[in-house]
Image: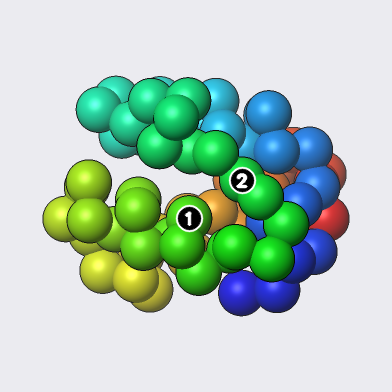
Amino acid sequence: MTTLEIKGDWNITKGKLKQKWAKLTDNDLRYTEGQQEELVGRIQKLTGETREVVENTIKEYSAACGCK
């Protein structure tokens, strides 16, 4: 994933991710530029989803809110 795919309006995307995977916290969803891989890895570890599912979900939610 690229920075632009995640960056957008992260608060909206973060809220949607928390709705999908209720066990995620704000701390789990900390986004620091340049650390997209770590973010995806954290979500993947906590949810048990595959990397592909996590990345596609982030892309889908980012696109739905007009973030990019």
SS label for mark 1:
helix
Residue positioned 46% across, 62% down in the render? 38
Residue positioned 38% across, 25% down in the render? 25
Q: Which residue is mark 1?
A: 39
> Which quarter of the figure has residue 64?
top right
Q: Which badge, 1 or 2, is on the more N-terminal residue?
A: 2
| Residue 18 location (% of width, % of height) | 42, 28
Q: Quadrant of the C terminus?
A: bottom right
Answer few, some or many: residues within 10 Å of disc 2's Cα (few below 14, many 20 plus, some between 14 and 19): some
Tell whether 2 sits left or right of 52. Answer: right
| Residue 63 location (% of width, % of height) | 72, 52
Residue positioned 66% across, 50% down in the render? 32
Q: Quadrant of the N terminus?
A: bottom right
| Residue 61 location (% of width, % of height) | 60, 45
Towards the viewer: 54 or 46 = 46
Circles 1 and 2: CB distance less than 8 Å? Answer: yes
| Residue 57 location (% of width, % of height) | 47, 55
Three-letter code, disc 2: Tyr
60 over 21 or under it: above or below: below
Q: Which residue is mark 2?
A: 31
SS label for mark 2:
loop
> Which quarter of the figure has residue 28?
top left
Answer few, some or many: residues within 10 Å of disc 1's Cα (few below 14, many 20 plus, some between 14 and 19): some
Three-letter code, disc 1: Leu
Tell whether 15 sits left or right of 9. Answer: left
